[in-house]
Amino acid sequence: MKINRLLLAVLLVAGAYAGFVFVFTYLLSEPIPASVIKMYMFFIIVGVVLALTADDESVREMVEPFTALVFNKKYLLLRNIVFITLPIIGMAITYWITKPTMDAPVELRTVHPAPPSSLKAFGKTFNLQTLKNPFRETENTDPDKFAAYVTEGRDVYYKNCFYCHGDKLAGKGHYAIGFNNPLPANFVDVGTIAQLQESFLFWRIATGGPGLPNEGAPWASPMPVWQNYLSENEIWKVIMFLYDYTGHAPRVMDDHK
């Protein structure tokens, strides 16, 4: 029995879609992302249409059902049903896609995720609950030395960090336009380092994006693991520069503001 080419096209496309879902979801237990399915289905639909409309006769056979539905008076009732039903289906699909929902997001992102209790870096283990910046005390005991440390931190920043975080530390560096989740941190904003202890910055800088815990998802943080490129002292000094430049004071354990 000969099958109309339009029906054959529908069957082939539906079979391909069912095959993707069944094979990967049920047999391999590896569901395919919807974006990948859409991409493959697009190429399958194009391929099926091209294969079934290779000549003029095939094209006429493919469009014959549409022509009969639109122009043949015998199908007047069916035509009216189709032309009324299709817009209703389209409106229903649009509504279900765009309707507001009160459901919580699948993943809730913590902007400042809690650091681990300890950190392994530079070949040793740091207790982040008690970790202090070893150069911070010079701010009160030796202002000249403190200023020298800040200057060294400034040099580290402008050699390594300003490309993303910007020359004014506002998160608007040359590469910032390439990131959107998350954007490079704006250190001038009172909601960033002003709310954090120096040990938190040490952890985030040393471990970079790969060091984020699960509650930091869904982030694709591009920040490098700076312990691979900077020394321990360089990280502490760049932290001092961040606070000094922005005018913020690092938060301490007994600061409940």
Image (tube, rainbow, N blue to C red):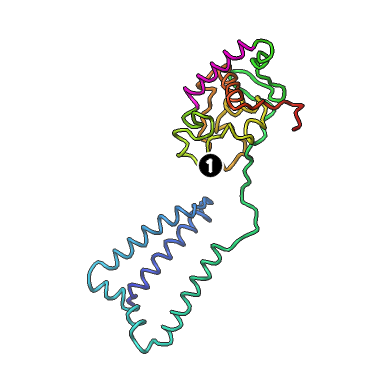
Residue 161 versus residue 98 in the image, above or below: above
Q: Quadrant of the N terminus?
A: bottom left
Task: Tally the marks.
Answer: 1
The answer to whether residue 96 is magenta is no
Q: Quadrant of the C terminus?
A: top right
Give coordinates of residue 117: x percent, y percent.
Answer: 69, 28
Residue 88 versus residue 50 in the image, above or below: below
Q: Which residue is mark 1?
A: 181
Q: Determine the main secondary structure of the stretch shown in magenta.
A: helix
Give coordinates of residue 137: x percent, y percent.
Answer: 68, 15
Which amino acid lies under the numbered mark 1 shown in the image of this protein?
Answer: Asn
Residue 15 figure quarter: bottom left
Q: Nearer the viewer, residue 65 or 14?
A: 65
- From which residue to which does the magenta span run? 143-161
Q: Nearer the viewer, residue 122 or 237?
A: 237
* Residue farthest along the left direction in this orientation: 56
